[in-house]
Image (cartoon, rainbow, N blue to C red):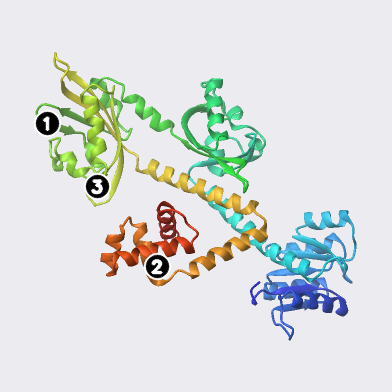
Amino acid sequence: MAQTTTILVVEAVLSDFGLIKSSLQQAGLCREDHDPDLKWAKSLAQGIAQARQVRPDVILLNTSLTESSGVSTVVAMNAALPTVPIIVLNGVDDDNSAIAALEAGAQDYLIRGQFDYKALARAVRHALVRTKLESRLRLFEVALDSAANGIVITDIKGSIEWANLAFTQMTGYCLEETLGCNPSQLLSSGRHDGEFYRQMWATILSGQVWRGELVNRRKDGTLYDESMAIAPVTSGDGSIRNFVAIKQDITERKAAELLIQKSDQQLELALAGSGLGLWDWHVGSGEFATSARWCAMLGLGQEEMEPNIRSLEKLVHPQDWPQVCAARDAHLSGETRAYESEHRMRHKDGHWVWVLERGKVVVRDTHGAPLRAAGTQLDISDNKRLNQEGAELLRRIETLMREVSKPPALVERERAAESGRSARISARQRQVLELVATGCTSAQIAEKLQISPATVVTHRRDLMAKLDLHTVAELTRYAMQSKRDSH
C-alpha cells in the first residue's frame, strides 16, 4: 500500500478510533506519528464534509453514530461520494445488517473484535483494487456503448446480459426487452436451419471464434443482413463463462453485391449511387477501362488513369500484389468461377485505400482462352476499420473480464510482478526488444546497435530469462505487444 493512500475514519468514540489507528499502523497503512493522510471524523455530517474536501481513497465507517445509525448511514455516505469505497466497521454480528450495508454500496463489512490488523489491511487493499476495476469497467462500458458496431455479451447459455446502443438501434429492441433473451431466438428470420446454429455453437463452445453472415429480423419485422463475430471469454481456469458478439449491419453492402449479378447492359445504371466502381479489361490488348467512381476512390480523374492493365501494379500495395495476381490468374485459367480480392490501393494523396474487387471473364474464344473480363470495385476501408476495432474490442473485453474475475489480491500481485520484470530490463535490452518487434535478425540488430552478434544473442537469452519466456516466438510476441502498449 502506497504511503499516499488517504484513509478517512468516521468514528464517534476516541478510544475506538485509537484501536483502528493502531491496526492501520501495524498493517503499515499509516505512520506512528501524526499522519496527514489519516483523517478522523466524529459524526456523519463531519465525515461527509471532510470526504468532500480531501477526497479520501477509502472510508472506514461506523454505522452507529450519534445522529445516524444503520444502513441509512451507508446510503448517505455513498450518495455523497459514490466513487469512494466504504468499509463498514460494526459491532453487530448480523447477516441481515451486513447484506443491507453491502446492497447500500459498502465494499466490505467487518465485525469489531473479530478482525485483526491483517484482516483490516486486506479489506482496505481489496476495496481499493475492486473500486479501480469497477471504475475501469464503467469507463469501458461507456466506450463500448459509443462503438459503431453492435456489441452483445451473453452468458454460457446464450442469454443476453448486456448490449450496447448500436445493437438496440440495429434491431429496434430496447435493452430491457433483450436482457435474458437468446439473440438467435429474438432476431431469428427463419432463413437459417438448425444445422447453421448447431455449427455456430459447436465452434464457440470449442473455444474458437465464429465468423459469418446471416439474415436477422428487427422488432418491426423487417429483415436485415448482418456480419457477426462471436468470441468465447474464458475464466482463469480456462472454462468459458461468457460470449461476446460483434455485429455489423451489412444490408446496404449485400444489396450492392447483388447488383453485380446484373447484365452488362444494366450494370452502369443499376450501380448508380451504390458506391461501386466498374472496370473492363480486354485481356489480349491489355486495355483497361475504369468508371469515374472507380477512379474517384483513389482520388483520380478518369483522364489521370493510364488505360492499361499494367497501371494496376503501380497502384496496388506491393505486399498485396502477389495475391491479386494469383487470384486473377486462377480465374483466367478457369480454376475459379469468379475473381475476388481484398487489397490496398494507393490514393492520390498517398494513403492506402482498402478495396473489394470482383469480376468474371465475360468473353472467351473457342478454345476457352479469356478475351474480356469485367467487374466492380468497392471501397471497404470503413468496414476494415470497424472489423479491426471489433477485434480490438474483443481482446480488450476478454482481458478486462478476466481481470475482473480474478481475486483483487491476485491482480495486485500480477501487476507488481510485471512491474518488477520491466524494471530489471536495461536500456540496451529495451533497444534490442524494440528491434525484435520490427522483425530484425540478430545480425541486423548488431549492425544497428554497433555491437557484436554474440552480444545480441546474450541479450536475447537474458531477456527470455528475466521475462520467463521459453522460445524465440514468445520473445517476439512480447516485444510486439510491448511496442503496441507503448503507443
Q: Disc 3 or 1, which lies upstream in sequence?
A: 1
* Mark 1 vs 2: CB contact within 8 A: no
Q: CA distance from mark 1 to mark 2?
A: 53 Å
Q: From the image, tell me which residue sits under label 2.
A: 429
Residue type at the position of mark 3 = His
Q: From the image, tell me which residue sits under label 3.
A: 347
Q: CA distance from mark 3 to mark 1?
A: 23 Å
* In the depicted structure, whether residue 363 falls above or below residue 279: above
**x%, y% of residue 380?**
35, 39
Q: Secondary structure under badge 1?
A: loop
Q: Is residue 476 visible?
A: yes
Q: Secondary structure under badge 3?
A: loop
Residue type at the position of mark 1 = Gly
User: How many residues crowd mark 2 within 10 Å: few (<14), some (14–19), many (20+)?
Assistant: some
Q: From the image, tell me which residue sits under label 1.
A: 286
Split into 4 quadrants, where in the image is the C terminus? bottom left
User: Is 301 situated left or right of 243 in this image?
Assistant: left
Residue type at the position of mark 2 = Gln
Camera-nearest residue between 238 and 305 = 238
Q: Secondary structure under badge 2?
A: helix
**x%, y% of residue 451?**
29, 69
Q: Disc 3 or 2, which lies upstream in sequence?
A: 3
